[in-house]
Amino acid sequence: MRLSRKELDTPPDKSGIEEQRIRFPGFDGNNETKQMACTRYYCNLDVGKYQELDRGDNFNSHRPMLDRYRQMLAEWKKSAKTYELTKDDTIRIASAA
């Protein structure tokens, strides 16, 4: 979602899109440890993928996130062009849950 927000730079229309709503919070370290560990692995410097998501907190959201991500995924699938999200798509997906 952060990459989609960058695409809105031309023309610069980010109104209604809050940075904190599109920032990847990670997974709950107590209940979603497998997902958190997998995220760390892929975003770690050793693997080198998705480094732009790293915030330096080991991707621990300190709250359950899987249900929200599943709702966001369902909203993403409703988009006409899933890899070319519009501003409205971005707001709809970020607002899920």
Image: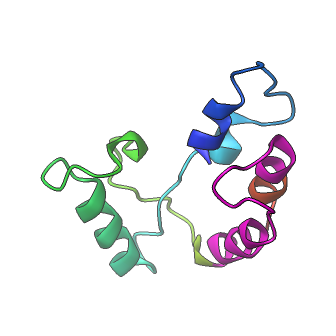
The magenta-colored residue range is 67-91
In the displayed image of the protein, which residue is found farthest to the left? 46
Instruction: Please provide percent x and percent y for residue 69.
Output: 63, 70
Front residue of 35/80: it is 80
Count of numbered circles on the image: 0
Residue found at x 41% / y 76%: 30
Q: Is residue 66 above or below residue 42?
A: below
Residue 67 relative to residue 97: left or right: left
Instruction: Please provide percent x and percent y for residue 21.
Output: 70, 46
Q: Is residue 58 above or below residue 15?
A: below
Secondary structure mainly formed by the magenta segment = helix
Residue 21 relative to residue 33: left or right: right
Instruction: Please provide percent x and percent y for residue 74.
Output: 74, 76
Quarter of the image for the C terminus: give it: bottom right
Q: In which quadrant of the rendered view does residue 58 lie?
A: bottom left
Q: Would you say residue 54 sits in the magenta stretch?
A: no
Residue 51 relative to residue 28: left or right: left
Residue found at x 50% / y 62%: 62
Residue found at x 75% / y 54%: 94
Residue found at x 73% / y 74%: 71
Q: Would you say residue 79 sits in the magenta stretch?
A: yes
